[in-house]
Image (cartoon, grey):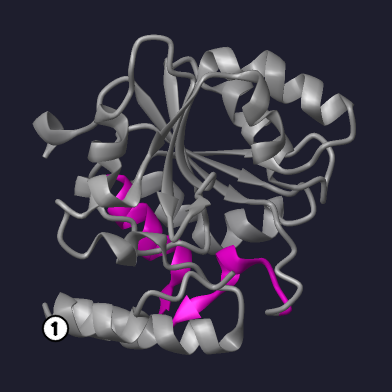
Amino acid sequence: MCEDLIRGVTAVILAGGKGNRLGCNKALLKIGDTYLLEILVSNIKAMSDRILLVVSPHDYNHLLSIHSSLFSSNCVSVICDSIPNQGPLLGLIEALKWSDEEWIFLVGCDMPFIEKPLVRLIYQSRKKGSQVLVPQLNNFLEPLHAFYHRSCLKAAETAYKQGKRKIKDFYPFVNVSVLEEKAMRVIKDYQISFFNINSTEDLQRAQKIFSCIQKMSMEEAILIEGTDSNR
């Protein structure tokens, strides 16, 4: 497995959101008896031996108490946003400051079914001068399933200081390489990688998908997930 890792990359999981529609931080959600974060970390560790979790200072102690064994057994580092509830852009900035790798792969903690072949394909799409590698699904960019070069830090900080809070707000000021959906179709079941959980209905669907995956029936999981990207 070690030989198959994506080298020179820190995998970053953002878990600083309040999860208003679900009533709690999504890193505290379970699919059946398994924590959502546990499923995601299991998938991520097959891609990178450096995993960083960025959390809100309000949730830091609680998450550590619940997931301490998960973090220690998988060598997950945990840091806090310097200011709580400021959106994903600050989480990206904190991760870029922390990591000493050339690239980070950024993912939301509500995306448990990340597919390694797709992540590798996105990374392989980089060109000379690329600073962001972002896939496009159903004509929407997916900034929380994307790679960011450490050279993005200055532009991200500038956008944040200007009051911006969305990751895509700094895209006009860096070199963005977009992987179009037609290029992703070489990866079987690539859509499942983008499934995210924003509602109780999504959580119920995630349970069905997880059950199918455990039964080695990815085709059935894809039928459940469909093409709805929950926008």
Q: Quadrant of the C terminus?
A: bottom right
Q: Is residue 43 magenta?
A: yes
Quarter of the image where one finds residue 114:
bottom left
Instruction: Determine crowd level at label 1: few under 14, some 14-19, many 20+ residues with C-alpha closer than 10 A.
Output: few
At 11% from the left and 77% from the top, the residue drawn is 216
| Image side of residue 224 versus residue 12, left or right | left
Q: Quadrant of residue 78?
A: top right
Q: Is residue 222 above or below residue 141?
A: below
**Is any part of residue 166 visible from this angle?**
yes
The residues colored magenta run 23-45
Mark yes or no: residue 32 visible: no
Left or right: where 52 falls relative to 3: right
Give the residue at x 37% y 53%.
Answer: 41
Q: Amino acid at mark 1?
A: Lys
Looking at the image, is 125 positioned above or below residue 189?
Answer: above
Q: Secondary structure at mark 1?
A: loop
Quarter of the picture holding the N terminus = top left
Give the image location of residue 146, x and y in percent. 45, 39
Residue drawn at (26%, 84%) of the image: 223
Report which residue position mark 1 lands on. Answer: 215
Quadrant in which residue 179 is drawn: top left
- In this rendering, the answer to whether 72 lies above or below 40 is above
In x, y percent, where is residue 215?
Answer: 14, 83
Is residue 79 a member of the stretch shown in magenta?
no
Which residue is at 21% across, 65% downward?
Answer: 189
Residue 17 at x, y percent in the picture: 71, 57
Residue 93 placement (x, y as % from top left) = 67, 28
